[in-house]
Image (cartoon, rainbow, N blue to C red):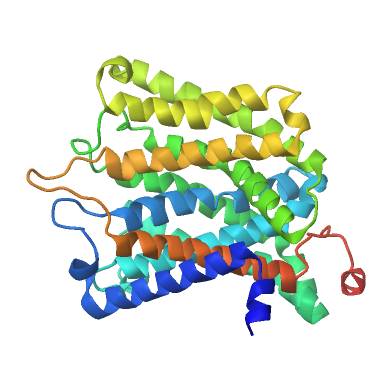
């Protein structure tokens, strides 16, 4: 038994320990309640589980709809090899968002109320419906991998027949709820700091998700490639790297233009320490990646592309923490820093996703075939 454990990769052992710790944290939350295991209070509407698991998690799952759009809508045939991993990552991301919400909600057994009692004027209702529906769509988009593994040709043909409508539906749903997460913050004009509060928050959320989508695909593909012992196609990585600076450029113009129009641009130089946080997200996640990905020599190396993608991912995380946690004012007399149970739960959910991705590469055919391939050819693969 000890010899088998020694043969397991160290990273896999660490992920397993983190996942088990996270599971124990969830058990503690349900046994003792939110107050006993978290540092949340009436001073603020939410804590780390919403800031990280929801706001960051949904955005970091954007690789699913961006890659699907590139491959199926814009005809990027060379990106087929990363389409299925991107869809799996997005599917797991949304599942983990749902699990995190079940942990965060005070009475999670009422989560089904959103399906029955519609509040069409609430952006949270739109987010809930889109997330649930898009998770189901992602499950269908990934199902060909399962059908190919089981050699079920009939359901495989059915999924291929409706593949394009599914992709279009997924893109529409993602567009709606990626932007609606920003709409939720529009209800906090006096709570969110003026550097970040703006009527165009939904647009900024959408473009930041568009930019981080290819970056997440590059980041995840490199890690899985190294751990599974296969090299990622450089042409694919370079192609994704060429897309990123264009989207980030639009995002940068929107951010700066919005501050200028609202007369708040001076705050990014004078309002300490909030301006430091703004410059951190802009320099790390926007300006530096635009410069690096625009340099042809930089794009010649998969390693450099990986670290460039890591900057975009990190910048997105800083931005979401800025708008959903750090720069939201609290009621006087209250403070907040996540407890170890809150941190362990979020880390555990992330570890769960990484373990499932590792297992998927072992069990399913993860290299995406062309939609025009026949089921017979898929079976032979």
Closest to the observer: 1 or 212?
1
Would residue 283 appear left or right of 323 to someone viewing this image? Answer: right
| Rendered-image quadrant of the N terminus | bottom right
| Residue 25, x across and y down, in percent | 35, 71
x and y percentages locating residue 198 in the rendered image: 32, 31
Q: Is residue 299 left or right of residue 98?
A: right
> For the image shown, how many numbered marks are present on the structure?
0
- Residue found at x 41% / y 39%: 318
Residue 234 spot, x, y in % from top left: 80, 40
In the image, is residue 52 above or below residue 257?
A: below
What residue is at 38 percent from the left and 65 percent from the top? 345
User: Who's the residue at 59% across and 56% down the image?
Assistant: 170
- Identify which residue, 161 or 341, lies in the foreground: 341
Pick out the residue farthest to the front: 2
Vertical comparison of 24 with 171: above or below: below
Please identify the residue farthest to the left as the structure is shown: 333
Q: Residue 143, how many percent across, how many down? A: 69, 71
Q: Is 143 positioned to the left or the right of 124 in the image?
A: right
| Residue 282, image quadrant | top left
Q: In which quarter of the view is residue 329 placed?
A: top left
Does any portion of residue 134 appear in the rendered image?
Answer: no
Residue 215 seen: yes
Residue at the spot 57% in from the left edge and 40% down from the top edge: 310
Q: Image quadrant for the C terminus?
A: bottom right
């Amino acid at each position: 038994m000890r010899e088998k454990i020694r043969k397991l990769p160290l990273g896999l052992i660490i992920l397993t320990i983190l996942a088990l710790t996270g599971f124990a944290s969830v058990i503690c939350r349900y046994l003792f309640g939110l107050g006993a295991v978290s540092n949340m209070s009436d001073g603020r509407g939410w804590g780390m589980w919403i800031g990280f698991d929801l706001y960051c998690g949904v955005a970091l799952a954007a690789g699913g709809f961006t890659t699907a759009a590139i491959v199926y809508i814009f005809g990027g045939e060379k990106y087929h090899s990363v389409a299925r991993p991107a869809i799996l990552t997005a599917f797991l991301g949304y599942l983990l968002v749902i699990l995190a919400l079940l942990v965060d909600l005070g009475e999670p057994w009422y989560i089904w109320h959103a399906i029955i009692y519609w509040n069409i004027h609430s952006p949270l209702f739109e987010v809930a419906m889109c997330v649930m529906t898009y998770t189901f769509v992602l499950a269908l988009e990934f199902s060909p991998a399962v059908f190919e593994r089981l050699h079920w040709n009939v359901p495989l043909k059915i999924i291929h027949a409706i593949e394009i409508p599914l992709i279009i539906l997924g893109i529409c749903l993602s567009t709606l709820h990626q932007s609606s997460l920003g709409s939720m913050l529009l209800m906090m004009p006096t709570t969110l700091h003026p550097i970040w509060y703006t009527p165009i928050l939904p647009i900024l959320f959408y473009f930041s998700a568009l930019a981080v989508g290819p970056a997440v695909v590059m980041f995840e593909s490199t890690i899985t490639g190294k751990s599974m012992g296969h090299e990622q196609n450089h042409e694919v990585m370079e192609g994704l790297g060429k897309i990123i600076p264009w989207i980030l450029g639009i995002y940068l113009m929107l951010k700066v233009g919005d501050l200028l129009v609202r007369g708040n641009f001076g705050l990014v130089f004078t309002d300490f320490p909030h301006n430091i946080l703004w410059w951190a997200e802009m320099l790390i996640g926007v300006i530096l990646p635009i410069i690096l990905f625009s340099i042809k020599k930089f794009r010649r190396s998969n390693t450099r592309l990986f670290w460039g993608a890591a900057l975009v991912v990190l910048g997105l995380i800083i931005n979401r923490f800025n708008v959903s946690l750090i720069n939201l004012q609290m009621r006087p007399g209250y403070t907040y820093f996540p407890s170890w149970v809150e941190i362990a739960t979020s880390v555990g959910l992330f570890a769960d996703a990484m373990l499932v991705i590792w297992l998927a590469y072992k069990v399913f055919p993860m290299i995406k075939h062309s939609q025009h391939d026949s089921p017979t050819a898929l079976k032979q693969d």
